[in-house]
Amino acid sequence: MLSSQGSTAHPGARGTARPATTTPHSPAKTSHPLRAAIIGGGPGGLYTAALLKRLAPDREITVYERNAPDDTFGFGVVLSDETLGGIEHADPVVHEALKAHFVRWDDIDIVHRNTRHTSGGHRFAALGRRRLLGILHDRCRDLGVDLRFRTEAPPPDRLARTHDLVVAADGVHSATREAYRDVFRPRLTPHRCRYIWLAADFAFDAFRFEIAETEHGVMQLHGYPYSPDASTVIVEMREEVWRAAGFDELDETESTARCAKIFTEALGGRPLRSNKSAWTTFRTVVNERWSHGNVVLLGDAAHTAHFSIGSGTKLAVEDALALAACLEEQPTLPQALAAYEEERRPVVASTQRAAKASLEWFEDLARYLGQPPRQFAFNLLTRSRRVTHENLRLRDAGFTDSVEREFGCPPGTPPMFTPFRLRGLTLRNRVVVSAMDMYSATDGVPGDFHLVHLGARALGGAALVMTEMVCVSPEGRITPGCAGLYTGRQGEAWRRITDFVHAGAPGTAIGVQLGHSGRKGSTRLMWEGMDEPLPDGNWPLVAPSPLPYRPGSQVPRELSRAQLTDVRQQFRAAAERAGQAGFDLLELHCAHGYLLSGFLSPLTNHRTDAYGGSLEKRLRFPLEVFDAVREVWPDERPMTVRISATDWAEGGTSGEEAVETARAFAAHGADAIDVSTGQVVAGERPEFGRSYQTPYADRIRHEAGVPVIAVGAISSWDDVNSLILAGRTDLCALARPHLYDPHWTLHAAAEQGYDGPGAVWPAPYRAGSRPPRTGRTDAPKPRLTLHGPRQDV
């Protein structure tokens, strides 16, 4: 959902940054400041002032706002039930005033290619931004807060000397944050779309997303009612579309009229109006610190999250609630400000991850235009990964059922239990046990541990079970405990495991992942020191270029032409043994900084010969290896390739290069791309989070047109269903969940009430297909209420 980002759309209560000349006032010994200055009169600043004054009427609270009381630069504000609950608990007066003016609705309409799909049960509440400010103005005045409109706030260092607390609620362009930039260390990330806040003088009957495919490119409308006779309308498009359409040459009035014309059907031919509206580019604000001395950041000054998930005002109000509570609960101001940041930072980080997923979905909207209509709608609704398949089913089962029918799910079959075909192999569901290094082999030979480990997961219901990276030579091992396929004895040991899987878990496929460690080899077992060199017994390393993985690592030798031929032959021989060992699928490991990945990344390939330089040249050796393997691998059995779609480091593999890499392998016969990220350079900075790598798989699937396997912090069956049904991936590979629960897939089926061909329980385990009963935990309920004189015992 959306909330008005007034401070993002317009400077509002902002001023030019002025460097602070002194350090803020030393924090008071008490956390109950008597004099507080609030910089910025938006909802976050006003609500902070009201809460602080209500909690301690003797406080002197001053709010500085450079604009007039009625000035506002957005139109409608959406607040969640959770936020409203916090307001009701903290200040019932404000809550009652808000309730009197809310408009509520349940539906979301998605209009694409003249087709409208409606999903219900979403429960929105909105009101006008001007009305919200008026309610907070009245509450502050009633409580005795000093509101100073049309007044520039004094420099923050001066306020810090004369007040016990300074709250910087001065928005995305915060002058306070800029004054203490060296302390707060902000990062402002611009994004790729232009947008403008407008309004219509009628109320949409639902939250409306409308897509316009114009001669200049794709544009989208986000609209929702905020009063019985008015709606917020946001028009958004990529920067290049905005310029091609000529919006960069139009003034406010002309832009407003042009938007109304483009979306005339959504508006019923009615006009749009503006309010000092300007086209702007959203910027994500992140600060390393939120406080300095007695100065603290709040709302957009501290953090921003894209308007498409309705976060701006919501986050600011929740910041105010948390800050006021921490000031009451903690004994000193430093402890209170630290507690405030500790409480809010993880919530904000989670919201920003969801907002990033949402804004990037809209940035890349054109990617999804060809999806079936209902899948497109489902994809849009689940774009932030906060609304999921199961959550949407609770909201609107009829809509979710219609999406599943269009996708091809048989009645009662969750998306994850639909089959998928790769070449001559049909997988009975969409779950893969991801390759996980076990470091438990002896001389490269897999033993009883591997039999039990892989066998248990094969019995657990996943369609495909992958081995760890199986090394193609002794020098290609990561550690002394890594398994291999460079001897006949190793091949025989693997045959024992594949035979068990095929006999003990009929219908389950087992795949082998072939790789070479490159510069990341000759290290200790993971639990003895991951990536640390062996204390003795090291073997020489080879790599595309003589670059150690990290300081203190062994320096590899640059592979010569003759050695490239040898390595290619090692992969070919290992693939022949894998075919003889009975594996159903072979994956070539070109990710995570190992040898073939080292050729692909510009950070690790500095060669100046035919195998280095442009992407085409960096691809040359990995493709030669792929061709050599494909030549000896049985034609009816599929091959996949695992890649790192980003290095999470400046100058590394780009998204465009990842797509081109996938296209190249597909052109050479790869049946799917296993899309991972990172682990290429030691200085990487991954953006961890739930299913954080799936956007890379999504992009490759849609732009390269090749099936993909998504990996990376996919931990629930709800995530799997959501990703599959939205069309972001074809298969989902899970690692840690299968370490926690070898029968994860079967348990997912049981928890969803599914009992079909996509999840077959082994006959000896059939009795466990339903959750075991537990002891009674509820107390007997009283059946009679006796009324009579109380008798004390």
Image (cartoon, rainbow, N blue to C red):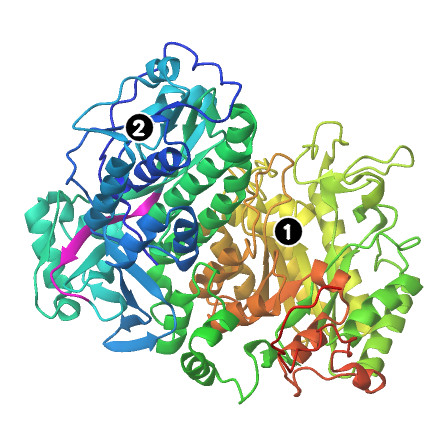
- Find numbered disc 2 in the image and state the secondary structure of the residue it sits on: strand
Mark 2 belongs to which amino acid?
Answer: Ile
Q: Is residue 664 left or right of residue 314?
A: right
Residue interval drawn in magenta: 191-203
Q: Residue at x 53, y 89 (%)?
A: 411
Alpha-carbon distance for marks 2 and 1? 49 Å
Q: Quick one: label 1, few (<14), some, or many (20+) residues within 10 Å?
A: many
- Which of these two is toward me, 318 or 735? 318
- Which of these two is toward me, 391 or 615? 391
Q: Quick one: label 2, few (<14), some, or many (20+) residues within 10 Å?
A: many
Which image quarter is the C terminus in?
bottom right
Q: Which mark is residue 39?
A: 2
For residue 638, what is the image quadrant?
bottom right
Which image quarter is the N terminus in?
bottom left
Q: Is residue 429 magenta?
A: no
Q: Are marks 2 and 1 in contact (CB under 8 Å)?
A: no
- Which of these two is toward me, 124 or 496? 124
- Find numbered disc 1 in the image and state the secondary structure of the residue it sits on: loop
Location of residue 359 in the rendering, given as x and y in whole percent from the top left corner: 37, 53
